[in-house]
């Protein structure tokens, strides 16, 4: 038994020693994992840089929500992220009051403008840390698509970015809810013709049509709940019919091999996000007025089965930005819903890589 | 640290103390330092950590064939959330120990423990701050403090020959930070406790 005691002492000493040593890595290498923190107006934002920094190209993944987590993509959707990391460096940063971010939470700072300001500081930090000669691709998913769009409305800020990748972004808040209803009707019609879940799709089609018939001029944080209930049920029906599949890492893999912090993330889930929810609707007028300022090469990727931010939003971006026709594209992934990195991770990664190769 | 955070915890501690003190009143009360423990204490089991404690026997009594003891155990620990935070933890633990089986040379026991204390977490990685001028500057040792409160259970055995103890246990703690994040800590511990004054009972 004495050996057991010695073993425990040795094991514990190794733990202590491991904690004390720093894991210094080269700044530029083909396979790195760097951890940075940025404190800004009370929020402590974790920024993980993983992949090929030697490429000097950094793809910032701006997560959805508001309230999601970019670190989740790094932990749970390695099939997608690893493929991009082989060639470029991925940057996963969790927004204030979201994911595994820390710091003193001020609900009054949970606004669109503040999130834009935070993103601006994250980009500045990357230039500060890695040098001015790096390239930056701004990649936003869902609310992240919205946020990256809002960021790029200012030409000065847009000048610090080389490429925009919009993945299922809900760009215009009021219009995207109507677009979702239209998409539900389109899918319902196709599924009814195909004889799939006739009762469910007929009911959803009728409810979506009723919502459209209300002719809501502008939704708000409260009235958006009605279309949200309809689209959530449509997502369930799509899931039941196995139209889309899901590829994710196990929780064990995410927590122990990729250091995801489930308890911190669930703690942030309880943050009050009502201000930013309403703020998004108020920001629609700014988007309408300034979206034509965007001239960057832009890739839009939407899932065919996405009823949360329908592909019409991609068409809206294509029609509204001032990027030359040859430098913008809309790709519809046929077997994806709202999260192609989960549904078609390889196809999404290859689509993005092909696009980035043209411009970086 | 926000002192209002401490308010509910002191009532919890009082309740826990009262609970564990039941039945030990009127016993012989002579605090005695028994031993020093060291344990691997992994957060969520596999995230490495280490804890050291000093075991102080507060009271003991014999009840049927079981020996019941009340301990106070100051604990100091460290654990890592890889790529996230270094965490340093300090708390007193109040422990009720009952023996449940005795062999010739080994005594088996279980412990129920309650603890409340402080944790300091420090971010891993290069930390930057946006200063008042809007410039980004590198800073050192960014992190904060948290209050931790929790319960746990331990099963162990004590050698009557060299008085050494081996134990395995589980601790659950609620972590509350100044940013009002209420998160959970779960530790699996595996340790050994050495007697400070080696007095064989065999």
Image: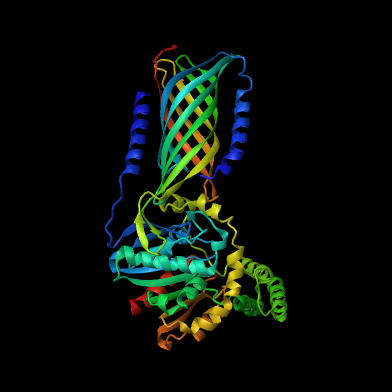
Residue B91, percent across and down? 48, 34
At 41% across and 81% down in the image, what residue appears?
A296
Residue A344 appears in view: no
User: B156 or B35: which is nearer to us?
Assistant: B35
User: A200 or B153: which is nearer to us?
Assistant: B153
At 63% across and 22% down in the image, what residue appears?
B22
User: A261 or A349: which is nearer to us?
Assistant: A261
Q: Residue reaching furthest bottom?
A: A325
Asked if residue A18 lies left or right of residue A223, the reply is: left
Asked if residue A259 lies left or right of residue A307, the reply is: left
At 35% across and 35% down in the image, what residue appears?
A11
Asked if residue A232 lies left or right of residue A16, the reply is: right
Quadrant in the picture for residue A272: bottom right
Relative to B132, residue A189 above or below: below
Quadrant holding the N terminus of chain A:
top left
Q: Residue reaching furthest front?
A: B133
Residue B101, percent across and down? 53, 19
Residue A210 appears in view: yes
Quadrant in the picture for residue A243: bottom right
Residue A63, percent across and down? 49, 65
User: B159 or A343: which is nearer to us?
Assistant: B159
Colour setup of the view:
rainbow
Quadrant in the picture for residue A159: bottom left
Quadrant holding the C terminus of chain A:
bottom left
Residue A181, percent across and down? 65, 77
């Amino acid at each position: 038994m004495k050996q057991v005691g010695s073993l425990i002492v040795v094991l514990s000493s190794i733990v202590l020693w491991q904690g004390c040593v720093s894991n210094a890595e080269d700044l530029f290498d083909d396979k790195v994992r760097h951890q940075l923190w940025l404190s800004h107006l009370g929020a402590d934002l974790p920024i993980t840089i993983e992949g090929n920094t030697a490429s000097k190209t950094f793809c910032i993944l701006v997560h959805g929500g508001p309230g999601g987590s970019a670190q989740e993509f790094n932990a749970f959707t390695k099939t997608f992220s690893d493929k991009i990391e082989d060639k470029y460096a991925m940057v996963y940063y969790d927004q204030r009051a979201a994911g595994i971010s820390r710091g003193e939470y001020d609900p009054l700072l949970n606004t669109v403008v503040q999130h834009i300001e935070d993103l601006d500081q994250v980009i500045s930090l990357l230039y500060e840390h890695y040098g001015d000669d790096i390239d930056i691709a701004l990649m936003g998913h869902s609310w992240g698509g919205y946020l990256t769009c809002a960021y790029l409305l200012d030409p000065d800020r847009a000048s610090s970015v080389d490429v925009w990748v919009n993945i299922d972004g809900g760009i215009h808040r009021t219009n995207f809810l109507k677009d979702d209803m239209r998409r539900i009707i389109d899918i319902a019609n196709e599924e009814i013709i195909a004889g799939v879940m006739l009762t469910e799709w007929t009911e959803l089609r009728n409810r979506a049509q009723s919502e459209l018939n209300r002719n809501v001029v502008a939704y708000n944080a409260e009235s958006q709940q009605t279309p949200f209930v309809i689209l959530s049920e449509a997502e369930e029906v799509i899931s039941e019919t196995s139209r889309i599949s899901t590829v994710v890492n196990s929780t064990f893999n995410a927590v122990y091999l990729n250091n995801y912090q489930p308890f911190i993330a669930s703690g942030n889930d309880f943050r009050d996000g009502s201000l930013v929810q309403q703020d998004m609707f108020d920001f629609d007028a700014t988007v309408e007025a300034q979206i034509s300022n965007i001239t960057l090469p832009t890739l839009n990727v939407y899932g065919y089965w996405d009823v949360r931010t329908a592909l019409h939003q991609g068409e809206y971006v294509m029609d509204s930005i001032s990027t030359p026709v040859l430098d913008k594209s809309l790709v519809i992934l046929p077997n994806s819903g709202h999260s192609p990195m989960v549904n078609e991770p390889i196809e999404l990664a290859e689509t993005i890589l092909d696009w980035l190769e043209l411009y970086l | 640290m926000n002192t209002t955070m401490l308010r509910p915890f002191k009532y919890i501690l009082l309740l826990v103390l009262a609970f564990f003190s039941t039945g030990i009143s009127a016993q012989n009360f002579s605090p005695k330092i028994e031993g020093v423990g060291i344990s691997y204490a992994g957060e969520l089991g596999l995230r490495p950590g280490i804890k050291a404690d000093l075991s102080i026997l507060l009271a003991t009594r014999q009840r049927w064939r079981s020996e019941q003891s009340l301990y106070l155990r100051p604990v100091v620990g460290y654990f890592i959330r890889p790529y996230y935070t270094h965490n340093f933890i300090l708390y007193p633990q109040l422990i009720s120990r009952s023996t449940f089986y005795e062999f010739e040379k080994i005594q088996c026991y279980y412990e129920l423990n309650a603890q409340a204390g402080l944790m300091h977490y420090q971010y891993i990685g290069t930390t930057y701050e946006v200063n008042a001028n809007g410039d980004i500057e590198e800073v050192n040792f960014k992190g904060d403090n948290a209050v931790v409160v929790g319960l746990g259970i331990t099963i162990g055995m004590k050698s009557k020959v060299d008085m050494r103890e081996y134990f395995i246990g589980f601790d659950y703690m609620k972590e509350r930070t100044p940013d009002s994040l209420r998160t959970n800590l779960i530790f699996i511990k595996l340790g050994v406790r050495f007697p400070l004054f080696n007095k064989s009972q065999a």
